[in-house]
Amino acid sequence: MQRTVGAGDVFNAGFLMGIDAGWSLSKAAEFGNAAGALVVASDQGVLGAASREEVEQFIQSHRFFNWLTPH
């Protein structure tokens, strides 16, 4: 069983970081969702929260929407 403690908190933090940065709702939600997913994948729970760069790499490597690629 995976540790899910903190996944919602990390989602909220990632989502609000995106909103504060002026991102669209969908981009902020995608970032928050990826950040929360990485917490669940970690064996450390919330203590394993990823950095912004790690979340961006996760999104790119899992072929989410292509908003991180400069145009």
Image (cartoon, rainbow, N blue to C red):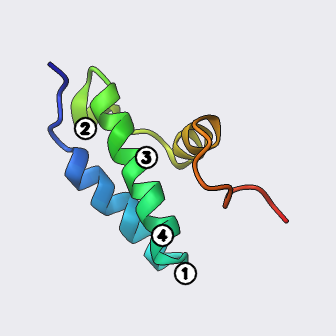
Would you say 70 lies left or right of 47 here?
right
Which comes sooner in the sequence, label 2 or label 1? 1
Which comes sooner in the sequence, label 3 or label 2? 3
| Separation of marks 3 and 2 at Cα, in angstroms | 14 Å
Q: How many marks?
A: 4
**What amino acid is labelled 2 in the image?**
Val
Residue picked out by circle 4:
26
Residue drawn at 56 percent across, 44 percent down: 59
Residue drawn at 46 percent across, 67 percent down: 28
User: Measured along the vertical axis of the image, is residue 3 above or below residue 71?
Assistant: above
| Separation of marks 4 and 3 at Cα, in angstroms | 12 Å
Rendering quarter of residue 44: top left
Q: Nearer the viewer, residue 37 or 63?
A: 63
Disc 2, SS: helix
Which comes sooner in the sequence, label 1 or label 3? 1
Residue picked out by circle 2:
46
Q: Identify the mark at residue 34; answer none if there is no mark.
A: 3
| Separation of marks 4 and 2 at Cα, in angstroms | 23 Å
Mark 4 or mark 2, whichever is nearer to me:
4
Residue picked out by circle 1:
22
Residue drawn at 54 percent across, 75 percent down: 21
Q: Nearer the viewer, residue 27 or 39?
A: 27
**What amino acid is labelled 1 in the image?**
Gly
Residue drawn at 41 percent across, 64 percent down: 29
